[in-house]
Amino acid sequence: MFYFGYDNYMKHAYPMDELDPIHCTGRGPDYDNPSNININDVLGEYSLTLIDTLDTLAVLGNETEFIKGVQLVIDNLTFHNTTVQVFEATIRVLGGLLSAHLLIVDPSKPFGDITLPDYDGELLSLANDLASRLLPAFENTATGIPFPRVNLQNGVPADCINETCTAGAGTLVLEFGILSRLLGDPIYESVARKAVQRIWDFRSNVTGLIGNVINIQSGDWVGKMSGLGAGLDSFFEYMLKSFILFGEPDDLKLFNDSYESIKFHMRRGRLKCNKGIGNMPIYVNVHMSSGEIANYWIDALQAAWPGVQVLHGDIEEAICSHAVFYSIWRKYGALPERFNWYLKAPDVLFYPLRPELVESTYFLYQATKNPFYLHVGRDIYNSINLHAKAECGYGTIHDVNTKELEDRMESFFLSETCKYLYLLFDKDNHINKHAAKYLFNTEGHLFPISRDFRQKVWEADMPTADPKKDNILAPTVVDARTNVSITNCDSIPIIRRYSLPLDSQYLEQLDQAIGVDLNL
């Protein structure tokens, strides 16, 4: 699946940003219609799909193609007069450059000999170049929360709005933080952390919740819906992952405080996932100031939430959260962008081959080793192959009911969807044997968990972290019998690995609530 998309991108689309898989052509920014942010926020005329895919090639063990791709990036990447979204450029391009650089310089070479002759940190230099072009977004903003878009040659456009979504402004700390610590320059991490803190400062003093759209000058909430999907999702994800990577206690406190408010105000249904009576547990969208239900839909991006819960150690909750989205998938053979759980029908019909459900499936399998999740992965793989395969790639499903396709293959399909599916089934992959040594960014880019990232080199007198005292970076031991990582996390009882993760009575209840045809 990956190579059918990747090879056709390189044949028909490179050096453009994306592949149009029906007409077998390339796609770049929409210069004729600058207001087409659906395209222009993402596509920056920087060979997006190649950069977004480099670490996937390494994970798949393709040393030759990885080296070839890196050399193409080094020889040809320049930043043009294009206006892109700060968030998308950060997680896809900056994340891709940093991940590939870190894999190349890893002296242990866990993914084979992927070092280029005479490599001199060119990808890191390109990452620094890109990030410096994103920095103007943090200027001339009264709150320190960045503008949503920036022109890569001219800074913030004169007509740029003063509003940004919470996730867009608050999902920059991993990439900016890694870059700062690699360069020894605090500027990138400091602006990213300030943005997160300022958003948090404007939370409701009643519920502790934040909204989904904020005015970057006044701090007023323009969008007051609080949820776990689009506009908010990765903000919470990066709180936790930032703690895992950098070991900053304040990051964990932010996440724990958020999680407490989320469970109290957004969670509906019975108290326990696999016990008791009552409706299926579900996290709903609420008004940030009151916790009252704001609408009756959940969206596809929320399917990543179970993966965050796995990282947090809340496995039972993750099982229930995941089951909701898998039931929706089983109903349509895809995941509609928005699903109305009250009407049991999609509110927004398209599915652009998003990775979030696959990602959560992968994390749940790694946590539980329950083969149920292998079956989930097989269902997802088969559905995509059946419904989304086009002439020279995989297309966005325009309508989950009719399976009509759109002529677009987003870069995250190769960067994330295929990567997580592959890792789900490749039990002997280095990542799966040493899971505690790696962290994925929200675009599926691979970052090593290193003590080097626990040090701020610009603070020379900072005391060195003690992993035993600070309970960080617990050593990873590999079980010789199972070839999986052993950590200090609580293990799932063996009996749970050979039964349905969700009791059959609750699965049936969930299918009825979603409207799944039980005769299928």
Image: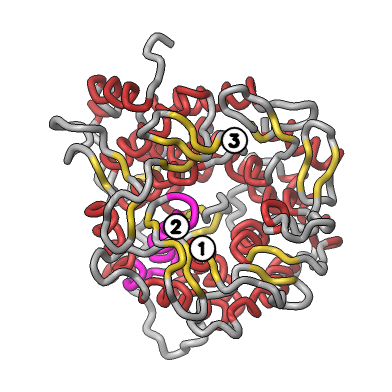
Say if the magenta span includes residue 403: no
- Could you classify mark 1 by the number of other residues whose Cα lies within 10 Å: few (under 14), some (14-19), or many (20 or more)? many
When the figure is inspected, residue 269 is found, relative to residue 152, above or below; the finding is: above
Q: Which mark is residue 232?
A: 2
- Could you classify mark 2 by the number of other residues whose Cα lies within 10 Å: few (under 14), some (14-19), or many (20 or more)? many
From the viewer's perspective, tell me whether residue 127 is left or right of residue 327. Answer: right
Q: What residue lies at 64% left-to-right and 56% top-to-bottom? A: 92
The residue where tag 3 is placed is 350
| Nearer-N-terminus badge (1/2) | 1
Q: Residue furthest bottom?
A: 461
Q: What residue lies at 84% left-to-right and 56% top-to-bottom? A: 32
Q: Position of residue 378 (x, y in %)?
A: 51, 23
Per the image, label 2 sits on a secondary structure element best described as: loop
Q: Position of residue 298 (x, y in %)?
A: 42, 42
Q: Residue furthest top?
A: 519
Q: Which residues are magenta?
A: 229-251
Per the image, label 1 sits on a secondary structure element best described as: strand
The disc labelled 2 sits on which kind of residue?
Leu
